[in-house]
Image (spheres, rainbow, N blue to C red):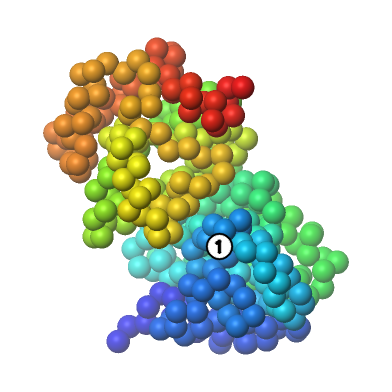
Amino acid sequence: MAQSSDEMIKREIIETLGTEYNDLLLWVFPESSKADQMIFGDSGGLTFGVNGLLYGSCDACWVKKEPWVNPFNNQKTLYKPIIALEGTDALNRGSSGDAQYQRFHHALGSVKAGIIGVYYLKKGIYKIQEDLYGMAYYASKIEKGTYLIIDDLNDLRNLLDAVCHPSGLEKYIESQQNSMYCIFKKRFDESYGSWDEFAKRRSTIIKDKYIIKYSGRMKRNFTDGSQRAGHIAVGEMYLTKYFFYDKHFFYLWPKMTADDRAYLDKHKKTDKEWALLRNEPNVTIITIDELNGVPLHIVNSLKRISNEPLKGSVLSVYSKCVKFIEAGLLDDTITIDKAILTKSGILS
């Protein structure tokens, strides 16, 4: 029976780096264990968060016996997490595009908690999407901890060495961050050349104090268990949030209404991805009925396709509608409701 991606990564880490590294202990649990999904504490747990909001579980964590206060619940622990790692063999398993973003939030919880988060994509047939390096670089600028993207466990070994000899840690992290930024910037310049061009091609509208990204999400994406819309939407959210980290981010879902969103708030209370979408700082999900100035025929057209997947004639209708809405948002004939702007701090 073939190893799963998680099992392969865990075995590789143990075989390459062992279960102890100087004064650091490796916490890693069998794939069949539920310990990964537990909140980090003295007896285990590889899920991190802040202020009562949990992020995705990690696969491994290096800890030292030193008191720490968990910012998720303000509980004191006897062990302090130093490096948390989310790993995947996705580059050998067909993950060549946006799917790579879907696990970004797993290590992000540790970064928000103030430690080093590592997203390890084992070298494979496909390359790491350059946008991931940019997401991690910009996340490190505004979050408490540091986010690193790697594809080689030798980089992790070097990081562990730097952690064990703190005088060189800051310099090492700065070097890794600069390297990530250069990879991202080179591809960004080749593909877009400017943020305005990026916005035009990535369903994004840039305003002075905020940005709007529109997406064809629908209620059924989140209620149908066969779909992974939650992971996809979370990945899109973090890419946009960190690329425009100095602006408020309005995530516009024109195929949905405020009632649809309220339904999901009620019925998806225990869904981790939905909780992240609804509670991420500086991010607000808005719907078609929270825009002013949208003609009734556009609203009705979107309602007619609200539960239909974006393909064929449905995609054609959707594209025409959002093109109209985008033009209106750009020239301010269509605006976000003032109550939403006020609540988000855009209007005083």
304 relative to 25 in the view: left or right: left
As drawn, which residue projects farthest toward the front? 266
Q: Residue at x 27, y 45 (%)?
A: 219
- Which of the two residues, 79 or 322, is positioned nearer the viewer here? 79
Q: Hey, what amino acid is under mark 1?
A: Ala
- Which of the two residues, 317 or 187, is positioned nearer the viewer here? 317
The quadrant holding residue 324 is top left
Q: Residue at x 19, y 41 (%)?
A: 307
348 is higher (above) or lower (below) than 166: above
63 is higher (above) or lower (below) than 304: below
> How far across and down, in percent of the image, does residue 39 sit?
55, 71
- Which of the two residues, 216 or 124, is positioned nearer the viewer here? 216
> How far across and down, in percent of the image, does residue 269 sit?
40, 55
> How far across and down, in percent of the image, does residue 220 sit?
24, 48
Position of the N terminus by quadrant:
bottom left
As drawn, which residue projects farthest toward the right? 167
Crowd class of label 1 (few under 14; some 14 to 19; many from 20; radius 10 Å): many
Q: Residue at x 34, y 22 (%)?
A: 325
> How far across and down, in percent of the image, does residue 335 sit?
43, 19
299 relative to 135 in the view: left or right: left
The quadrant holding residue 218 is top left
> Does residue 248 show up?
yes
Q: Residue at x 40, y 34 (%)?
A: 286
330 is higher (above) or lower (below) than 228: above
Tag 1 residue: 107
As drawn, which residue projects farthest toward the left? 313
- Which of the two residues, 122 or 119, is positioned nearer the viewer here? 119
